[in-house]
Image: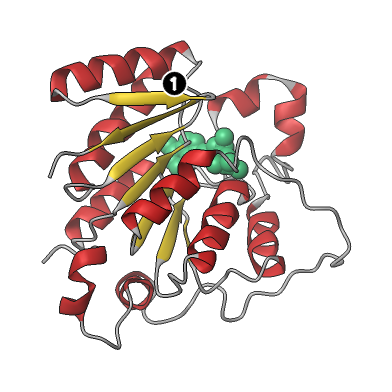
Amino acid sequence: MWYHALSVVSIGASMSIRQSFIDRIYDGVDPFASYKTSKAASEALPEGWGSTHPYFKQYIDLLKPGLIVEIGTWLGGSAIHMARLLRAAGLNDSCIICVDTWLGSSEHFMYPPGRASLKLVNGRATFYDDFMRNVVQHGVQDLILPFSTTSIAAAEVLRECAFAPDLIYLDGDHTARGFRADLDLYWEILRPGGCVIGDDFDWEAVQANVINFAYLQKVEFTSFSNKFLMRKPN
Ligand SMILES: C[S@@+](CC[C@H](N)C(=O)[O-])C[C@H]1O[C@@H](n2cnc3c(N)ncnc32)[C@H](O)[C@@H]1O
């Protein structure tokens, strides 16, 4: 049984997708349940990139997604924006699964500003806490679940557990190979009629793969203000 917005009823009225994921992956323990930060509440929280693009509102309003999967969450800018849109649309039983290693992308390691943003401690990135704190400070922890693993591992888990997202946001690995692997894997688990939104369409590796993928899949895509959008046929 694939779980998505239209089949939520089959899980049972009392069992949301979020709770199913918590039960299946976290043995029933909500990752936010005992979260505490050591930082002061007043400490500034940076946002993401292009996180409030109009595609998000347009397709959340259209699809009324029960399950959104975001690949590449960073500090939560786009996830928090989508969560607020879900809230505004009254979709309080929906869930955004945020897939991220919280270890950064290849580009972060290449230049000093990128490395600084990883907050390396003993050689390991430590910005996961900033993401968790951001989510809690924006009051959307009931709509978001972190899934701290690679996009490939997450796709495998989602497939095995039969979670079929209604909306997928791709903003993780932007290398040609990594991006293509994500596009291929996540298109497979996207429910028919659902859509993929992706960031950084001006990156050659992204754009060339979107064009090639759309051609092979015989689907159309649109792009606007550096994001692309592709809908899976029903
Ligand atoms: C550009 S940032 C995401 C920005 C975020 N969507 C926003 O708008 O605020 C990219 C993120 O993808 C994550 N990432 C890169 N490659 C990944 C992979 N293969 N699997 C999981 N996460 C990955 C990085 O850790 C980083 O946090």
Q: Residue at x 64, y 56 (%)?
A: 131
Residue hosting label 1: 175
Could you tell me the amino acid type at mark 1? Answer: Thr
Q: Residues within 10 Å of mark 1 (few under 14, many from 20)?
A: some
Count of numbered tags: 1
Is residue 69 something one can see in this rendering? no
**Residue 228 image-quadrant placement:** top left
- The residue lying toward the viewer, choosing from 144 and 88, is 88
Residue 96 screen position, x and y as percent: 44, 60
Residue 233 spot, x, y in % from top left: 15, 39
Q: Residue at x 65, y 41 (%)?
A: 48
Nearer to the camera, 26 or 169? 169
Q: Quadrant of the N terminus?
A: bottom left
Task: Name the colour scheme.
Answer: secondary structure
Q: Locate residue 80, reporting x and y percent.
A: 59, 56
Query: Does residue 218 sit above or below 61 in this rendering?
Result: above
Residue appearing at x 61%, y 80% in the figure: 34
Q: Is residue 14 left or right of residue 26?
A: left
**Residue 12: percent from the left, percent from the top?**
21, 84
Instruction: Give the image quarter of residue 8.
Output: bottom left
Mark 1 falls on what kind of element? loop
| Residue 199 is at least partly visible in this image | yes
For the residue pair 146 and 232, the one nearer the viewer reads as: 232
Residue 226 falls left or right of residue 220:
right
User: From the Cβ of disc 1, is ligand 1 less than 8 Å away?
Assistant: no
In the rendered image, which quarter contains the C terminus? top left
